[in-house]
């Protein structure tokens, strides 16, 4: 086995060493998951629900430790990290309501009775990126387990610690062995094996569109089920009739949260031309006011980027010719820091407008009218989220319907609630997670006709 160092991105210190799983161990884990699934799918719905509730309670009891672990491993602010651990608890409680509610249909037919069942798929492979290690893992494993599947989960190489702890908590809570296994390792080894191993019946992948398209192509060979949660280039559209002060005060948090390493980051701010200058004037103090620093401090609002390599990638978006309107603060010393940065693009083809930066860089550009705003918002291959700021309810609804994205918010930047569906249009993904139908995505519908004559 090879060992990988886990680095604290705020200090550049090694916080842990983790043994990476290889291909043979992955195969063995998948085989254990397959065998465990035979009994797990037969566990009575009420008992499966109870076990998931116990798992949620174990997460709640360990919440502060999980949050501190995420601060050390991922550089998330302590406030965010507590929310993230709480989100795992909530997703598990919500999932615990699913086994008893996986309702089928009874369909009128002649000469008998027709019923449908939602059968578990078998082994589900969940591949997680480094930006939200806890919630994204839980959005996959909670509903998958609820529907009677067993789960093998690969955390990102950079951020395996909280996932490993969640695997331990599942066992402590009484989940049978091998029902939920966490396999730290390389995407090209462990993740790839989820794609090629015939016993893995579904892959849930969250990550870049580039890797996601390879996963989808690989899964196609076995007609393997797939859910993809990929990149984004979301628009924050500010109309002249909006509460400009609120729109400007909140815009930084719609894009710089988690240092911009958020698939839902509103990384393009579209502002109606008549209020463009006024908006920028209001935005500047809001951006300069974002508290960037030690993520363990209670009042810090933005931490570091995940790695030195990622910081280089982000910095490369700012070319010598890029017009930087203003930047926020960043600490000196060790840590992969990058300041909140506001740029004014020159042309619609600028990389900063067309590519996902995945860092604290936002482009602000003007639009003329409603049609122009919708045209610019949709001028991207992505379609994950977005915000619309206006005081006109009719316009809010018209624009919400016209923007090609899966998760929109009006006069707010909220994207994720565990009880509402989440996912992307176009190249931002395929399928939906969370919400009332979450468990269905981990089942096959079976139709049974019973003759009565
Ligand atoms: P990726 O490089 O795509 O990695 C994501 C995961 O896939 C990691 O666990 C990675 O393992 C694994 N992986 C890499 N190559 C693989 C392969 N050939 N086969 C199977 N698995 C493989 O993305 P990232 O840089 O970690 O995450 C950032 C991206 O995720 C952004 O584009 C962001 O928008 C997207 N994202 C989307 C969402 C939603 S919900 N739509 C949420 C969060 C993030 P390693 O750790 O070994 O690289």
Image (spheres, rainbow, N blue to C red):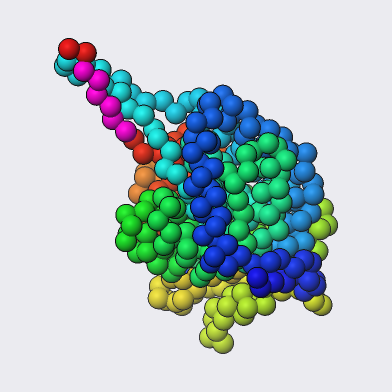
405 or 140: nearer the eye? 140
Q: Residue at x 53, y 26 (%)?
A: 44
Q: Residue at x 36, y 29 (%)?
A: 117
* On screen, residue 122 above or below 50: below
Quarter of the image for residue 116 reads top left
Residue 251 visible in the shown view: no
Q: Quadrant of the C terminus?
A: top left
Judged by its main secondary structure, the magenta piece is strand
Q: Which residues are magenta?
A: 446-451
Pick the front one: 403 or 435:
435
* Residue 186 percent location from the top left of the image: 57, 68
The image shows residue 318 at horizontal and vertical percentages of 57, 80
Picture residue at 56% right of the left edge, 55% below the top: 29
Q: Position of residue 39 (x, y in %)?
A: 52, 36
Q: Who is closer to the viewer here, 89 or 58?
A: 58
Q: Nearer the viewer, residue 87 or 58?
A: 58
Determine if residue 64 is in view.
Answer: yes
Percent position (x, y) of residue 197? 43, 59
Identify the image quadrant of residue 331: bottom right
| 35 lies above or below 1 | above
Assess whether residue 364 is covered by the magenta stretch. no
Which quadrant holds the N terminus?
Answer: bottom right
């Amino acid at each position: 086995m090879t060992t990988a160092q886990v680095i604290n991105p705020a200090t550049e210190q090694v916080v842990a060493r983790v043994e990476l799983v290889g291909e043979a161990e992955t195969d063995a884990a998948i085989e254990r998951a397959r065998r465990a699934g035979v009994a797990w799918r037969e566990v009575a719905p009420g008992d499966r629900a109870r076990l998931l509730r116990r798992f949620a309670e174990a997460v709640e009891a360990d919440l502060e430790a999980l949050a501190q672990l995420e601060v050390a491993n991922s550089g998330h602010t302590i406030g965010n990290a507590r929310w993230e651990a709480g989100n795992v608890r909530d997703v598990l409680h919500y999932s615990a309501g699913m086994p008893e509610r996986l309702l089928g249909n009874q369909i009128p037919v002649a000469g008998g009775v027709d019923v449908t069942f939602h059968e578990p798929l078998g082994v589900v492979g969940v591949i997680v990126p480094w930006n939200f290690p806890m919630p994204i893992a839980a959005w996959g494993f909670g509903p998958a387990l609820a529907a009677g599947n067993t789960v093998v989960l690969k955390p990102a190489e950079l951020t395996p610690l909280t996932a490993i702890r969640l695997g331990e908590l599942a066992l402590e809570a009484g989940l049978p062995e091998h029902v939920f296994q966490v396999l730290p390792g390389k995407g090209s080894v462990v993740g790839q094996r989820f794609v090629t191993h015939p016993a893995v019946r579904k892959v849930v992948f969250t990550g870049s569109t580039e890797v996601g398209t390879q996963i989808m192509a690989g899964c196609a060979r076995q007609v393997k089920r797939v859910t993809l949660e990929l990149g984004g280039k979301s628009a924050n559209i500010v109309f002249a009739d909006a509460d400009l002060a609120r729109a400007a005060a909140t815009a930084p948090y719609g894009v710089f949260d988690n240092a911009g390493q958020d698939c839902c980051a509103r990384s393009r701010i579209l502002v109606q031309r008549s209020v463009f200058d006024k908006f920028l004037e209001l935005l500047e103090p809001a951006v300069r006011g974002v508290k960037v620093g030690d993520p363990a401090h209670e009042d810090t609002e933005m931490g570091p980027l995940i790695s030195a390599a990622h910081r280089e990638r982000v910095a490369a978006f700012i070319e010598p010719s890029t017009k930087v309107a203003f930047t926020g603060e960043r600490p000196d010393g060790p840590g992969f820091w990058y300041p909140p940065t506001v740029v004014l693009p020159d042309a619609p083809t600028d990389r900063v407008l067309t590519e996902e930066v995945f860092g604290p860089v936002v482009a602000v550009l003007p639009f003329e009218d409603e049609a122009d705003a919708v045209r610019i918002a949709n001028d991207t291959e992505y379609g994950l989220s977005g915000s619309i700021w206006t005081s006109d309810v009719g316009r809010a609804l018209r624009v919400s319907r016209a923007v090609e994205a899966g998760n929109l918010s009006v006069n707010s930047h909220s994207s994720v609630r565990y009880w509402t569906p989440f996912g992307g249009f176009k190249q931002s993904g395929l399928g939906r997670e969370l919400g009332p139908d979450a468990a269905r995505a981990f089942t096959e519908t079976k139709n049974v006709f019973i003759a009565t004559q």
